[in-house]
Image (tube, coloured by chain):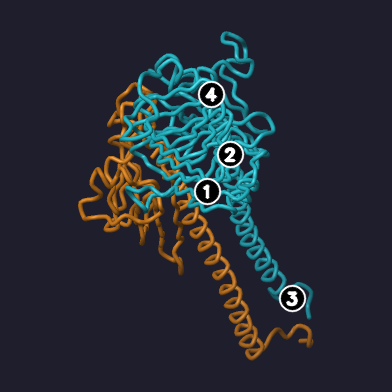
Chain colours: A cyan, B orange
Amino acid sequence: MRQGARGSALPSALAAVALTAALAAALADVARTELLLARARRTAAQALAAADACLARVVAGLPVGWDFGAALRGPDGVAGTADDGVLAAPAGCTATARPAAGAATPPTRLELTIDAQVASGRRRLRALVGRTREPGAPALLWLADAAALAPLGGGTIALDGRDPRDPAVRPWAAVAAPGDPAVLDAWLAAGTAVGPPIVAEPPPLAAIVARAAAAAGPGGLVGTGTPQPAITFVAGDLALAAPAAGAGVLVVDGALDVAAALDFSGVVVATRGLRVVAGARVTVAGAMWLGAPPGASPLLATGQVAVARDPGALATADALLALPRPAALLGLQDLG
Amino acid sequence: MSAAERGAGLVELLVAAVLAVVVLGMLTAAVAGGARLLTTAGRRGEAEDTAQLALEALLFDVRRAGYDPRGVGVEPLAAAQASRLVLRADLDGDGTVDATSEETITWVCNLAARRLSRLVGRQSLPLADDASTCALGYLDAAGTPLAIPPGGLAAAERARVRSVTLTLALSPQGLARPATRSIRVALRTAP
């Protein structure tokens, strides 16, 4: 063949290669963009999840009570210092608090700012925190410490957390206590309980005792007849050797020893625990909040204990003596 | 004339032309196929991104609905229909909900226009076009969907809503399958 008359195969092939390469490059660019977007979304989602988790932990860690004055004083508990408003937060995030706009003094609503960082992602939340509507932990037995919870030892315990007004509502937990929920599970397995245990901050027993001591009036437990709702305060141990009944709030700043029958509608508080001997029984429509001496069990029952949820009895008790409430999330804003 | 200077004969030219047409046709088909693939990939990516962004915007809005720092009783859901949702929040903490700012956000699924819109105050912002499915739903505390009457949920029913769902499918022309997303967002207000 003559020089210069080789045809167009090479230019055609080169053109085809160039076109294909351009298409491949464009496709690669689209794929790369999508990959970057997906990565950015994943990082943002991780940071948001971390911020949500941090917020949940911080809110759960706020002390049960009536207001947030103590939380605002910071870890050192002293107002007017540099750590005011700084809250304990899990690793990877910070939490600060200030009174919500228009909140009372001491504040009953907080505005929290949560700042969470995960890898290259960062998320800030502003949350509004108040107190739950219903008082106390959402549990029938609220224990200050469950580490030394003793086995029932021949007694029986029946815990029914179902709402009698609406069985469809999620039942209250059988037991709430700080610490290992496995201990509570094992303890509950020996009794009859409707509703699982939950981990909760301990009840503020000292503050309840102080408030009950200041507010207690006439009335109390009765041997016969229908008891009137009242705040019954007992300084020291209370031993019941004869049947008794009561309503409202019973606060025993010591141990409650029952050797007969106790029927109570409302909230029973015993700072050094409840002991029910064989043949005796305690029936509570409402809730029981129990403390214990260090290393001792808050509940020793060789007799019968029955606690059933009763929102009406709890409301009556709360109207008599304002009861403490856990913190609850009331609102949220994503700050980006 | 020497053999080397004779040039191409008619048959050779015809064969070369046929071969060229075949090769060019194959090339054209390959390039066109690649271009179609590129276009489809671009459309798919855009549709998926649009759907995802719409859901993220709903997440953002529902999470802050009912924000009420002064405790004046801001209702998170002012209207709850299958195709329309009005969310309210007191974002600046002044005790009122402004109807003309971000404190009032309305979501509208307009399937007749194949569009999902987000209305901030009185300003309408189309979020997604080519919507073939767009449905809002409302669940109670137990996660049970609430039946939505034609006029939307009544106030008592709205108070029972604990989470909002959105199912969105975008079907732009040229996509064999729609870009489908769904989300369930829990309200962050106390029950």
Residue indicated by mark 4: A253
Residue indicated by mark 3: A6
Residue indicated by mark 2: A299
Q: Quadrant of residue B18?
A: bottom right
Q: Amino acid at mark 3?
A: Arg
Q: Answer whether residue A252 is visible to the viewer in this image.
A: yes
**For the N terminus of chain B, which image quadrant?**
bottom right
- Residue A33 lies, in percent from the top left, at 60, 51
Give the CA separation, mark 1 to mark 2.
Answer: 10 Å
Give the CA separation, mark 3 to mark 4.
Answer: 109 Å
Give the CA separation, mark 1 to mark 3.
Answer: 101 Å
Give the CA separation, mark 4 to mark 1.
Answer: 23 Å
Neighbourhood count class around disc 1 (C-alpha, 10 Å): few under 14, some 14–19, many 20 upward: many
Is A259 or A121 nearer to us in this picture?
A259
| Mark closer to the chain start, 4 or 1 | 1
Residue shown at 43%/27% (left/top)? A323
| Mark closer to the chain start, 4 or 2 | 4
Question: Do labels 1 and 3 touch, CB within 8 Å?
Answer: no
Q: Amino acid at mark 2?
A: Leu
Neighbourhood count class around disc 2 (C-alpha, 10 Å): few under 14, some 14–19, many 20 upward: many
Compared to A41, does A86 lie above or below? above
Q: Answer whether residue A330 is visible to the viewer in this image.
A: no
SS at mark 1 in the image: strand
Q: In the displayed orientation, state which residue is furthest to the top.
A: A80
Q: In the displayed orientation, state which residue is furthest to the bottom.
A: B11
